[in-house]
Structure formats: C-alpha cells, structure tokens
Image: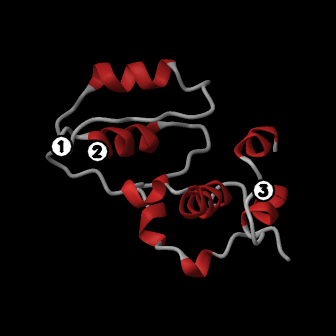
Amino acid sequence: MTNETNIGSILRTKLHRPPVPRDHVHRPRLLEYLDQRRERPLTLVSAPAGYGKSVLISRWMETCDIPNAWLSIDEIDSDLRQFLPYFLAAVQTIFPDAMGKTAALVNAQTLPPLPVFYLV
C-alpha cells in the first residue's frame, strides 16, 4: 500500500481554489483578521451561501506566504469515510509525502474509533 490516498476516486475540483474575480468586493479588514491568525493550523470559514467565503479565502491564499491547501466540502462529506480521503488529498497537494500512516488507516476495511485519528 502506498502513502497516497486513492486520488483517482475523488472529485479533483474540490481540491482547486477558485479564481478571484476582478470585480470582487475588497475586504481588507477580514484579510487582516485572517492574516493575524495564520499561525493556527486550520482555518474554517462558515457562512450562508453567497456571503463571499470562497472569494475571501481564495484572495487571502493568493497573498499568504505559508503553505495552504483548498478543500471544498458539502453535506456528504460529513461521513468520515467520505471526508478523510479528500482531506488527505488536500494535505498531499502541498506535502506529498505526508499522512502515510493516516492514509493506511483510511484505506483499511474498517475505520478505527475516532480518538485514534486525533493521535495520528
């Protein structure tokens, strides 16, 4: 078994950051807020549809000088077996050799209990 997730079986479009339109609404205060918190290992942005989340984060990622990965999720991704391969594939877009042990767990016949994933 390799250290990579089965990327062929996922929708690769979920791993691509959308382009920032030329006529987007500039939000310097929100970009500064995100930039001040970039030391955090994960940023989750949640708001109703149409609030500009994707454009805001895409713009921030354009200007950010730290490694970052994009993953678009929806309701079906609340299933751990569905979500983890996408998460691993997103991480592997910037760190190709990362997540080997976790990938082995995800590809197993049965998933270990959730607390095991917190320790990997």
Quadrant showing the N terminus: bottom right
Quick one: which residue is furthest to the bottom in this view? 8
Among the two numbered marks 2 and 3 on one chain, the one whose residue lies closer to the N terminus: 2
Residue beneath the point at 62% across and 64% down: 85
Q: Is residue 26 above or below residue 36?
A: below
Residue occupying image coordinates x 24% and y 28% = 27
**Label 3 Cα crowd, 10 Å radius (few <14 / some 14-19 / many 20+):** many
**Residues at badges 1 and 2 in contact (C-beta under 8 Å)?**
yes
Q: Which disc is residue 24 wearing?
A: 1
Q: CA distance from mark 2 to mark 3?
A: 31 Å
The kind of residue on which mark 2 rests is: Val
User: Foreground residue, 36 or 43?
Assistant: 43
Q: Nearer the viewer, residue 99 or 111?
A: 111
Residue 118 shown left or right of residue 7 in the figure = right
Residue highlighted by disc 3: 102
Query: Can you say whether 45 is above or below 84 in the image?
Result: above
Which residue is located at x 19 percent, y 50 percent? 22
Which of disc 3 and disc 1 is earlier in sequence?
1
Q: Position of residue 103 (x, y in %)?
A: 76, 63
Q: Secondary structure at mark 2?
A: helix
Secondary structure found at label 3:
helix
Number of other residues with Cα within 10 Å of mark 2, as a class: few under 14, some 14 to 19, many 20 or more: some
Query: Where 49 falls versus 38 (above or below)?
Result: below
Per the model, the C-alpha gap separating discs 1 and 2 is: 7 Å
Residue 102 on image: x %, y %: 78, 56
Give the labeled residue for mark 2: 55
Which of discs 1 and 2 lies nearer the camera? The answer is 2
Q: Which of the marked residues, 1 or 2, is nearer the chain's N terminus? A: 1
Q: Amino acid at mark 3?
A: Thr
* Disc 1 residue type (three-letter): His
Q: Are marks 2 and 3 in contact (CB under 8 Å)?
A: no
Image side of residue 58 versus residue 99, left or right: left
